[in-house]
Image: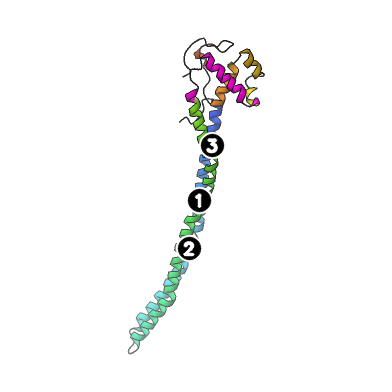
């Protein structure tokens, strides 16, 4: 598949547009990473809750360990303190861990959305058109062969005069229809080739007569 036209100016413009699309995708990826990092920093709140809960639970465990050494009521008091530690600090630590996990997942989702949504919109707007252009360039490159044949050149000139916008035609000749009627088709052929993205005949391909007949039968490519 032919991705870029032969005409240098059109090729440069298309390459610039493709480069802009690539840069935008990279920009969206950077934004996604930044969003992920900014949201993920909120997980410190869950980490703090987890640390606080663990501290409370450890304090109750230490108290339970000390109470277990008391005579008569030591074991019972130790069990009560251990249960209190699990019910308070343990629950708080578990809640903090769940909150921390939720923040990590949220950061991942938001980061992906910040990258994916604008990227999908950008590619949906540019890729189909780019594929159509590449297919058109490939087809033109296959069809526009042996343009030293006078009849083929005349057909291309006629197509250019009949289908191209006037502002495109007048860049090549001030009187496109007059040229076509008079058989001066070189400018119209050049306009048709430019529109198709195919390289024009080079200087080494032989001189052309006013009617477009070649001085050399060499092929275009």
Marked residue nearer the N-terminal end (2 or 3): 2
Q: Is residue 149 magenta?
A: yes
The percent position of residue 197, horizontal first and vertical second, equals 53, 26
Quadrant the N terminus occupies: top left
Q: Which residues are magenta?
A: 141-166
Residue ID at (52%, 38%): 128
Give residue 54's quadrant in the image: bottom left
The residues tagged by marks 2 and 1 sit, at their Cα atoms, a distance apart of: 20 Å
The kind of secondary structure element at disc 3 is helix
Q: Residue at x 50, y 49 (%)?
A: 116
Badges 2 and 3: C-beta atoms under 8 Å apart?
A: no
Is residue 17 in sight in this rendering? yes
- Indicate which label's residue lies in the foreground, 2 or 3: 3
- Check disc 2 and report its element: helix, strand or loop: helix
Give the Cα distance between marks 2 and 3.
Answer: 46 Å
Nearest to the eye among marks 3 and 1: give it: 3
Q: Position of residue 81 (x, y in %)?
A: 39, 81
Where does label 2 land, which residue? Answer: 44
Which residue is disc 3 drawn over?
Answer: 129
Q: Tell me the number on the disc at residue 153.
A: none
In the depicted structure, whether residue 63 falls above or below residue 32: below
The image shows residue 11 at horizontal and vertical percentages of 53, 29
- Near mark 2 (Cα within 10 A), the count class, few <14, some 14-19 or many ≥20, is some
**Which badge, 2 or 1, is on the more N-terminal residue?**
1
Q: Residues within 10 Å of mark 1 (few under 14, many from 20)?
A: many
Q: Mark 3 vs mark 1: which is more N-terminal?
A: 1
């Amino acid at each position: 598949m032919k991705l870029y036209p032969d005409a240098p100016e059109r090729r440069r413009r298309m390459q610039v547009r493709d480069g802009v699309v690539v840069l935008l995708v990279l920009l969206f990826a950077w934004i996604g990473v930044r969003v992920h990092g900014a949201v993920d920093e909120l997980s410190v709140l869950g980490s703090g809750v987890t640390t606080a809960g663990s501290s409370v639970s450890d304090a109750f465990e230490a108290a339970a360990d000390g109470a277990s050494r008391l005579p008569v009521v030591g074991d019972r008091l130790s069990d009560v303190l251990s249960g209190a530690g699990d019910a308070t600090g343990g629950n708080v630590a578990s809640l903090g861990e769940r909150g921390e996990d939720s923040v990590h997942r949220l950061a991942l989702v938001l980061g992906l959305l910040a990258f994916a949504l604008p990227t999908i919109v950008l590619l949906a707007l540019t890729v189909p058109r780019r594929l159509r252009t590449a297919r058109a360039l490939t087809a033109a490159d296959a069809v526009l062969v042996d343009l030293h044949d006078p009849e083929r050149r005349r057909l291309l000139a006629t197509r250019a005069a009949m289908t191209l916008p006037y502002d495109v035609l007048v860049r090549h000749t001030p009187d496109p229809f007059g040229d076509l009627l008079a058989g001066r088709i070189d400018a119209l052929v050049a306009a048709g080739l430019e529109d198709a993205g195919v390289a024009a005949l080079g200087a080494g391909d032989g001189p052309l007569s006013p009617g477009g007949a070649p001085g050399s039968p060499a092929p275009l490519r």
